[in-house]
Amino acid sequence: MSSVNMADEKPMDRLVCGDVGYGKTEVAVRAAFKAIDSGKQVAVLVPTTILAQQHFATFSERLSDFRGEIALLSRFRTRQQQKDTVEELAAGKIDLV
């Protein structure tokens, strides 16, 4: 049985769960950076729109010194913003959403 990790060609998905303050966001930021640096796109799914906004701010700040386009997709975006984001994702113009 082969191991599945970020260096493999096959796309992967992972669920990161744990109590508040145990480093889930840090794990997600580092994994996203590695994926983007390898030319991949990343989607971070969160359970609330507030957490999506918080993560958008955190990822944007933490990755600001590196290449990569980050976008937010949530119900608080206008329909046009959502449509534009989805189109840019499909075109490969957004690295992390």
Image (cartoon, grey):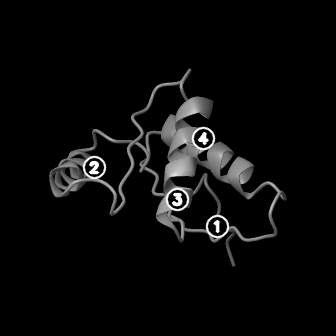
Please tell me which residue is depicted at 35% across the width and 55% down the height of the picture.
Answer: 73
Q: Are marks 3 and 4 in contact (CB under 8 Å)?
A: no
Q: CA distance from mark 1 to mark 2?
A: 25 Å
x and y, in percent, of residue 84 in the image: 18, 48
Residue type for callout 1 = Val
Query: Mark 1 sits on what residue?
Result: 4
Q: Is residue 84 found left or right of 60 in the rendered image?
A: left
Secondary structure, mark 3, is: helix
Q: Residues within 10 Å of mark 4 (few under 14, many from 20)?
A: some
Query: Mark 4 sits on what residue?
Result: 58
Secondary structure, mark 2, is: helix
Q: Which mark is residue 50?
A: 3
Residue type for callout 4 = Thr
Q: Which one is closest to the eye, mark 3 or mark 4?
A: 3
Secondary structure, mark 1, is: loop
Q: CA distance from mark 3 to mark 4?
A: 12 Å
Q: Which mark is residue 45?
A: none
For the N terminus, the image quarter is: bottom right
Q: Tell me which numbered mark, 3 or 2, is placed earlier along the sequence.
A: 3
Q: Which one is closest to the eye, mark 4 or mark 2?
A: 4
x and y, in percent, of residue 95 in the image: 40, 42
Query: Mark 2 sits on what residue?
Result: 89
x and y, in percent, of residue 5 in the image: 65, 60
Could one spot residue 79 in this view of the protein?
Answer: yes
Secondary structure, mark 4, is: helix
Please tell me which residue is depicted at 54% across the width and 66% down the height of the picture.
Answer: 46
Q: Are marks 3 and 1 in contact (CB under 8 Å)?
A: no
74 vs 70, nearest the viewer: 74
53 vs 38: above or below? below
